Amino acid sequence: MIFRTTHKDSNTRARTGVLSLPHGDVITPAFMPVGTNGTIKAIHHSTVESMGYDLILGNTYHLYLRPGTEVIEHYGDLHSFSSWNSNILTDSGGFQIFSLAPFRKIRREGVRFRSHIDGSYHNLTPEKVVRIQQILGSDIQMALDVCTPPDISFKQALEALEITTHWARRAKKEWLETPDSYRGYLFGITQGNFYKDLRKRSTEEIIELDLPGIAIGGLSVGETFNEFQDFLSYTTELLPLDKPGYVMGIGTPEYILAAVENGIDLFDCVYATRIARNGTVFTKNGTIALKKALHMKDKSPIQEGCTCRACTQYSKGYMRHLFKTNEILGPMLATEHNLQFLKDFTADIADSIKNNTFREFKTDFLTTYSGER
């Protein structure tokens, strides 16, 4: 087992745990910053590491296309290539292929798609995706899956589910045949769209494979928050308690709280760093749009008590100035702040779980947390 629960909240399914990976232990619940191309945009790896992050996400699809596996293999693996010394989870590329709907063809054998970079054609199979992630040196690699949007037919959802299970079985076989020198773990992904009977079937089929961890896919793909909560709660009740659970593509406080309340251990999203580059930052009272004129002469930091450089050294007025003049320091500082906020937020969540007060913490946080200012 690579995961153990260290404390369970007495009133919810929320829990803390330790995930043991090749590049060290990860304390859960844990948010994973997204480093699509082997770097988290607008921030140095050493800064991310100094915050206490020890698991980040890389993108198999993007790294496969550029710089390519030959280049990364030449340097050893993605850790060596990018000078990141802690753990890396790489997604399968399924979501990126999902977003390329007009440019891809999915069959049981695999998927054929056109590169968004140069229009060239490529084929991916579940076996090839395992081998790519082995070359990347992924501490956690994801099986290739078929992600689907809301509002598709039952027949379409069933077909995607059956292919996802078929691919997961083939991925497991390939993963078991990787060299002993590769120590990364394969996680399966459940699908089923927004049909509960299909969600149940998909979850049962992925559990049957007895992989080291399980991700819930096909959520946060355009559904309402109420739908997200409903299908999240339904699916997590089916998951085994002795394995880490991962919800893909969530990174705002309300979504993170919903996931943790349902026993989820890992989550990731580009949202925090993307909005930072556009001048929007998290606070305990909601998000702040730094470009607004009301911050022009504001001498206070983004968030009192925050230990990031934006808050300990600069004012909101100066931060606004950086964004209004398109200075690159603005996105860098805002990115650092948002990642520090989420790191502190998950630490506070963990404390509340240990104190059996998660539900009260969630209520109090969401009462204060509001819309953009």
Image (cartoon, grey):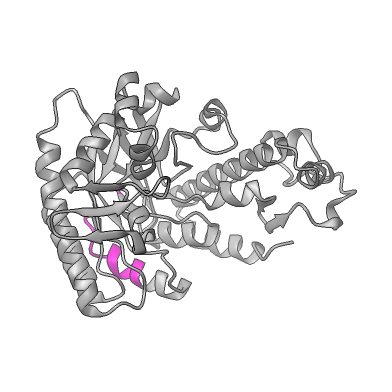
Magenta stretch contains residue 241:
yes
Nearest to the observer: residue 207 or residue 58: 58
**Residue at 30% from the left image edge and 31% from the top image edge:** 69
Q: Residue at 82% across / 41% down in the picture? A: 318
The one nearer the camera, 199 or 284, is 199
Q: Residue at position x 41%, y 75% from top?
A: 227
User: Across the whole image, how many numbered discs are drawn on residues?
Assistant: 0
User: Was residue 332 drawn as part of the magenta stretch in this picture?
Assistant: no
In x, y percent, where is residue 208? 11, 56
The correct choice, above or below, for 23 with respect to 4 in the image is above
Please say if 52 is above or below 11: above
Q: Where is residue 67 in the image (x, y as percent from the top left)?
A: 39, 32
| 107 relative to 326 in the view: left or right | left
Image coordinates for residue 145, horizontal then vertical, percent: 24, 56
Tell me the magenta residue range: 231-244
Outermost right residue: 297
Asked whether residue 322 appears in the rendered view, the answer is yes
In the foreground, 54 or 113: 113
